[in-house]
Image (cartoon, rainbow, N blue to C red):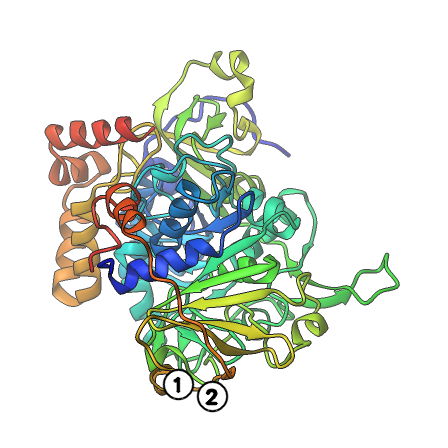
Amino acid sequence: MGKSATNKLMSAAEAVERFVPDGAVLGMGGQSIGRCPMALSFEIARQGKTDLTVVGCNLAMSMDVLVGSGLVTRTECGTGNLERYGTAFRWRAAAEAGELAVADYSHLGMASRFLAASLGLPFMPIKSLLGSDILTTKRADGPDPDYVLMGNPFSIESEPVALLPALSPDVSIVHVQKADAAGNFAIEGFSTHEPEMVKASKAVIVSCEEIVDPEYFRENPGETTVPFLFVDAVVHQPFGGYPTSVYRRYEHDREHVVEYQRVARAGGDEYADYLRRAIEEPGDFDGFLAWALTDDKKAVLRDEMERLI
Amino acid sequence: MTDYRPDELMVVEAARHINDGDVVLVGTGLPMLAGLLAQRTHAPNMCYVVETGPVAPRVLPTPISVSDPRVMHGAVSHGSLLSSLGGVLQRGLADVSFLGGAQIDRYANLNSTVIGDPERPKVRLPGSGGANDLASHSPRILIITRHERRRFPERCDYITSPGYLDGPDARKLSGLSVPYPEISVITDLCVMEIDRATGTLGVARLAPGVAFGEVQEKTGFELIRPADIPSINPPSGDIVELLRREVDPGGIYLKG
């Protein structure tokens, strides 16, 4: 059954309380330093939702704060990485300490698993991964078996494919440019793995830079990335992707990302201090933004983006 | 004699491996610079496809992430991971992919996942991302890396992205769609290429002033040594100028 076109506007606190249970398989939107669902992730950390499995493609800071908060037992992803800014350091430390199970796939592997679930299929064939250790290394706490090799049944040639199991997150969080109150939303710029992941998910929370009029998507249906059928909650949160970038809105904040990576690498008291100041004490994401970002800096990040599009 | 730095030579040599009209899958860093250089010189019709989805962008200098808005600038479509890695790569439309890794072994397999036991890693690296997909589906694979012995072990601790796996026909036997890709490893000391007969790396060109012995010494496996190894052509002053002025004007990746 699809979700209805009711008014789904609510606060991040209410959305997380209602749709993110402890033990959830949490689908994470965004990629590296681009359009990560920071406001929603910080709210999950604030509410201390525990025993999470975080799934996605390029998991970065929005996953790393959940691991750093001790809330994640497992990840399934293509990579844990902020590229030039380094590995996701709390994720790396937890994996090296044996406190976190990491199930490795390629990006296409993860996208294919979401695609399968989004089409109501139990698995998807893939021609990547063949011959590699990604395919054959046993994934801790994963499905058993977690892949199957088979030949193309329509060919007399031996044409092996790997079958990967569908992946349907309990709840996914994404941050986008535009949504309406019913949950129709538009991603501008590349859409990562989010269209497939969102359509594969049992529940979906969308935060957005801008709430558009209920008629907007009826007048501009070509802009719709995902219609309301899949979405449970809509959270209006300008700068909700900060400090990552949101295409056409603002550039990522180098200084904040560098500082986060510094404390995430250091761990210990310095990291705990960051979590306290960024997540606990502010009480909500606007409080975090008030601590992290002046109006002048907001204008600078908007201007930087303006020059790049 | 043009004054150039080792990273600049690597970028220039990598650019020479790109043909006009190629569909090139690329991330950021030195590979992106090589593509931009090729596009501004001999390969104006080269088509970038970025892992995150953008097709044929007019990339602004200097992107630091595949999620950087600079890689979306002027693209004809923005796409998604599925459209680029599935719809272009797995579909069979790519000509060339750039890859990197912490370890590269004799068969040009790459490891970007773990050092040590995968169950209890000594060092947990970022993981595949799109790298395995690029290595699986590209007819030509270019790898740019500094030449250090620890990067070139006999055998990768973990194969993230397949080279020739463990022999000349191993890719075919494993079912990969591109059974015999051309693979070139471009370092500050040399260019290595896969020898199809053995599926292992040999030295194809040496950087100016570098001897085979030095390369072998800094490599953890025995390299195939042809009788006669030509030199990498040094770049002209114009090309170095173009690199510094237009391709990476802020010196983000070419700091020297």
Q: Earlier in the sequence, mark 2 or mark 1?
A: 1
Which element carries disc 2, helix, strand or loop? Answer: loop
Of B97 and B111, nearer the camera is B97
Of B79 and A203, nearer the camera is B79
Mark 2 burial class by Cα count in 10 Å: few <14, some 14-19, many 20+: few
Establish if A226 lies above or below B52: above
Q: From this viewpoint, is residue A61 visible?
A: yes
* Residue type, numbered disc 1: Gln
Establish if B207 lies above or below B221: above
Q: Which mark is residue A295?
A: none
Establish if A66 lies above or below B53: below
Please provide percent x and percent y for residue A177.
38, 28
Q: Which mark is residue B216?
A: 1
B129 with respect to B28 (left or right) = right
Please provide percent x and percent y for residue B76.
50, 30
Q: How many marks?
A: 2
Q: From this viewpoint, is residue A53 visible?
A: no
Q: Residue furthest front?
A: B1
* Residue type, numbered disc 2: Glu
Task: Say which residue appears at 69% left-offset and 53% top-offset.
Answer: A122
Establish if A249 lies above or below B62: above
A4 with respect to A256 (left or right) = right
Question: Where does label 2 land, which residue?
Answer: B222
Distance CA(mark 2)–CA(mark 1) = 7 Å
Please provide percent x and percent y for residue A286.
20, 34
Q: Do the residues indicated by labels 2 and 1 lie within the same chain of the protein? A: yes
Task: Say which residue appears at 49% left-offset and 84% top-offset.
Answer: B225
Mark 1 burial class by Cα count in 10 Å: few <14, some 14-19, many 20+: some
Chain letter for the residue marked with disc 1 in the picture? B
**Circles 2 and 1 in contact, beta carbons < 8 Å:** yes
In the rendered view of the protein, which quadrant contains the N terminus of chain B?
Answer: bottom left
